[in-house]
Amino acid sequence: MSLNFSISQEKQLDEIVKKLIKSISAHQIIFFEGEVGSGKTTLIRYLLEGIAKLEKKKLFFQGSPTYQREHIYNFKKYDVVHFDFYQVDNSLIDIDEYLLNNCIFIEWPLEALKSKYFDEALFVKIDLKNKIREIKIQSRNNKWLKKIKKI
């Protein structure tokens, strides 16, 4: 099962975010895939801003952690750890401890991580075609997708 969205303007991300943020909680992992410039970091910023808005909290978005590898955002219900594994070889990286109390967003996920969490993760793929972004949201966890679709 997958959900598909086509957007031509950044502000259209609001509708996608409204569907996603209500289904996000601790112990979840979301992989963001797409070419450079496709909008992965922008979508993550919108998600973080949406969570902050729900909690009536200010957010300072730190950008993509390309060189730092991770940024942590503290919220009341759970924290979000934003990883970026661009230019990281496909070695084994252990994120199990991060999953204990956090929701994890990963840009440029490593194949080993995608394989390990394939059955439980949410996959967000963004393709840019003629200034239109095609956003495909998939998971083998159909409960997650049904909840997103229902909202």
Image (tube, grey):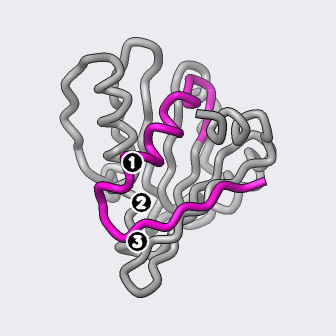
Give the residue at mark 3: 38
From which residue to which does the magenta span run? 1-29
Examine the structure image and report whether residue 18 is included in the region drawn in magenta. Answer: yes
Q: Position of residue 52 (x, y in %)?
A: 30, 26
Helix or strand or loop: what does disc 1 sit on?
Answer: helix
Mark toward the start of the polypeptide (1 vs 3) = 3
Confirm or deny contact between disc 3 and disc 2 (CB under 8 A). Answer: yes
Residue type, label 1: Ile
> Residues at badges 1 and 2 in contact (C-beta under 8 Å)?
yes
Confirm or deny contact between disc 1 and disc 3 (CB under 8 A).
Answer: no
Horizontally, residue 135 falls left or right of residue 77, namely: right
Q: Residue furthest top?
A: 76
Q: Which mark is residue 44?
A: 1
What residue sits 68% from the left and 62% below the top? 111
138 sits to left or right of 23? right
Percent x, y of residue 50: 35, 34
- Marks 1 and 2, how far apart at CA: 6 Å
Q: Is residue 98 in view?
A: no
Residue 133 drawn above or below residue 117: below
Q: How would you rate the neighbour count of disc 2 (Cα within 10 Å): few for under 14, some for 14-19, many for 20 or more?
A: many
Q: Is residue 59 visible?
A: yes
